[in-house]
């Protein structure tokens, strides 16, 4: 699956979330990273993922789901969270 230039939403910036952002960015995706914690609380994590086409949004605002297709998080039983929209 080619994700170059696709919009992808990654929720949660713990260990797996940070690595997911890095991999997706490396594959050319436009990544929006989100965590319930604020930018101040995640200063170190955010500095590790800074780059073109990577944005951070703190908290879980109601208009957040802008990723495409689905997202992967190992914490979910099947690994995938479905229902993200363009």
Image: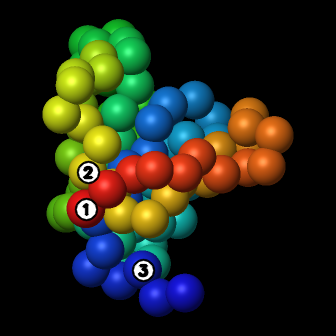
Question: Can you give x and y, in whole percent of width and height, for residue 74 in the image?
Answer: 74, 43
The residue drawn where x is 37% and y is 13% is: 37
Describe the colour scheme in one phrase: rainbow
Could you tell me if residue 49 is visible in this image? no
Q: Residues within 10 Å of mark 3 (few under 14, many from 20)?
A: some
The residue drawn where x is 65% and y is 44% is: 73
Q: Residues within 10 Å of mark 1 (few under 14, many from 20)?
A: few
Q: Secondary structure at mark 2?
A: loop
The answer to whether 80 is drawn above or below residue 6 in the figure is above
Q: Are marks 1 and 3 in contact (CB under 8 Å)?
A: no
The residue pinned by badge 3 equals: 3
State which quadrant residue 10 falls in: top left
State which quadrant residue 45 falls in: top left
The residue pinned by badge 2 equals: 66
Of callouts 2 and 3, the N-terminal one: 3
Q: Secondary structure at mark 3?
A: loop
The residue pinned by badge 1 equals: 86
Q: Nearer the viewer, mark 1 or mark 3?
A: 1
Residue nearest the viewer, comparing 83 with 8 = 83
Question: Can you give x and y, in whole percent of width and height, for residue 32 in the image?
Answer: 29, 48
Q: Is 70 left, or right, of 62 in this rendering?
A: right
Of callouts 1 and 2, the N-terminal one: 2
Query: Quadrant location of the N terminus?
Result: bottom right
Q: Nearer the viewer, mark 2 or mark 3?
A: 2
């Amino acid at each position: 699956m080619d994700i170059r230039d696709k919009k992808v939403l990654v929720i949660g910036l713990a260990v797996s979330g940070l690595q997911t952002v890095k991999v997706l960015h490396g594959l050319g995706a436009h990544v929006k990273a989100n965590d319930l914690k604020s930018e101040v609380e995640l200063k170190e994590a955010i500095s590790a993922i800074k780059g073109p086409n990577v944005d951070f949004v703190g908290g879980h605002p109601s208009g957040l789901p802008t990723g495409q297709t689905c997202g992967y998080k190992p914490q979910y039983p099947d690994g995938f969270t479905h229902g993200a929209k363009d």
